[in-house]
Image (cartoon, rainbow, N blue to C red):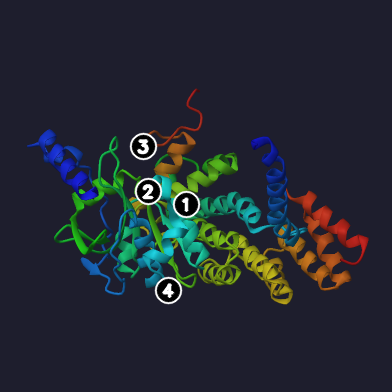
Amino acid sequence: MIRRVAKPVSIFLTICMLLLSLPHKSAFAGMIETETALNATRGQEARDYLNRILAREDVRASLVAQGIDPLEAKARVESLSDAEVVSLADQIEELPAGGSALGIIVGTLLIVFIVLLITDILGYTDIFPFVKKHSEAK
Amino acid sequence: MRRINITLLVLIVNLMFIGCGGVFFKHWPQPSENLPVSHELDSVPFYPQEAYQCGPASLAMALTWSGIQANPDTITPEVLTPSRKGSLQSAMIGAARRHGRLAYPIAGPDSIFEEVAAGHPVIVLQNLGLSWYPVWHYAVVVGYDLHKGTVILHSGVTPRKRLSFRVFYNTWARSDYWGLLVLSPSRLPAMAKKHNYISAVLGLEKAHQWRAAIEGYNTALARWPSSLSARMGLGNSYYALGDLESAEAAFRQATRRFPTDGMAFNNLAQVLWEQGKQQEALEAATRAVDLGGPLVEEYRRTLKEIQKGKP
């Protein structure tokens, strides 16, 4: 019984699936979909964001105060993979009081916090236990 | 039945932890300084739930607030999984999108009061039971009072139920602080993050709600004018609607703003080609290939199609 029914049903379902998938596919032939764009641009945007932070005078001053060469910090950010840069940028954006408001006014404490977070992730410092070290095994 | 369960549970828990009320106590996030001390929304309707309807009822309240006609009975078939006697979070998100509303999951416990203060009700998933005896429940946060330490929820059959911070955070933490904003695509969450917001608008595209998606991308661009993905999404949504002229305009703007990225040139080429503007299409496609990048194979394919002749 099942065998007799299975074949027509599966053929019917196959056709249904094809019909479902066809119009969407053909509608986007030749187009880069938004999802692809979103994933492709994310790494670059995170990089720009981090570079903007590292270019700020107060951040650079704070780095120097920590004994860290801003150029070296920048070089280390550049050597991170897209996924790592995105997670770093996310952590900064998720800071309380909104790292996203960074462009507006940021208290000295928050700057120090951000700097330490970055340098922690880059392996200069070891302040925050929740930061997974980039190369723990060294 | 559930009420009996809860009463029983409360009894058991009380018996187990008598005298150590702080056992589940975790610290809750400190709200930011400029947050109003208390706020209560009066624009959120209350729909009492029937059995297993907390998901549909919560979503119906949020949808109605956002300007969509809905009630628990109309929403139930869209979200309820009968075998689970409940509604999955993904079903709640999907249903909101199918109504042309932006479903924006809030990340963690930090921003909930900011959202309420901005006038946005927040759907939360609580576990009223324990981790090993879960009693999952959706409710809508409609207010808070920092002085009294209470959260105000439309929950179950009780409108404006007041819960202490401690109980609220304990029950909410068990869902990993799952919370959802259901917004008109013309509104931004109070604590909107660019990537999350654009992903939420992308969800509207996936639900084929192109007009809502267009509105959402425009909202995103007003806040983050430098987002290439939002510009791409805007063009793609117009394209999906068959409005090639508007799509062309959106991609053109994208190419002007991002002259070194091939994606917008590729899509511009396709849209021009479909309008019969062969020469311009060829130029745009060639430009995309010249710019290269990880998607260069796609650009080459587009160029090849255009070189073949008419669409």
Callout 1 amino acid: Ser
Classify 10 Å Cα crowding around label 2: few (below 14), some (14-19), many (20 and above). Answer: few
Which chain does the numbered disc 3 sit on? Answer: A
Residue A29 lies, in percent from the top left, at: 77, 58
Alpha-carbon span between mark 1 and mark 4: 21 Å
Classify 10 Å Cα crowding around label 4: few (below 14), some (14-19), many (20 and above). Answer: few
Camera-side residue: A14 or B192?
A14
Occupied quadrant, residue B188: bottom left
Pointers 1 and 4 in contact (CB under 8 A)?
Answer: no
Callout 3 amino acid: Phe
- Residue in the picture at 50% in, 44% down: A87
Residue A104 visible within the image: no
Q: Say which residue label 4 marks.
A: B69
Which chain does the numbered disc 2 sit on? Answer: B
Residue projecting furthest to the front: A1
Sequence-earlier tag: 1 or 4: 4
* Dot 4: element: loop
Front tag of 1 and 2: 2
Q: Is residue B76 above or below residue A82?
A: below
Q: Say which residue label 1 marks.
A: B90
Front tag of 3 and 2: 2
Front tag of 2 and 4: 2
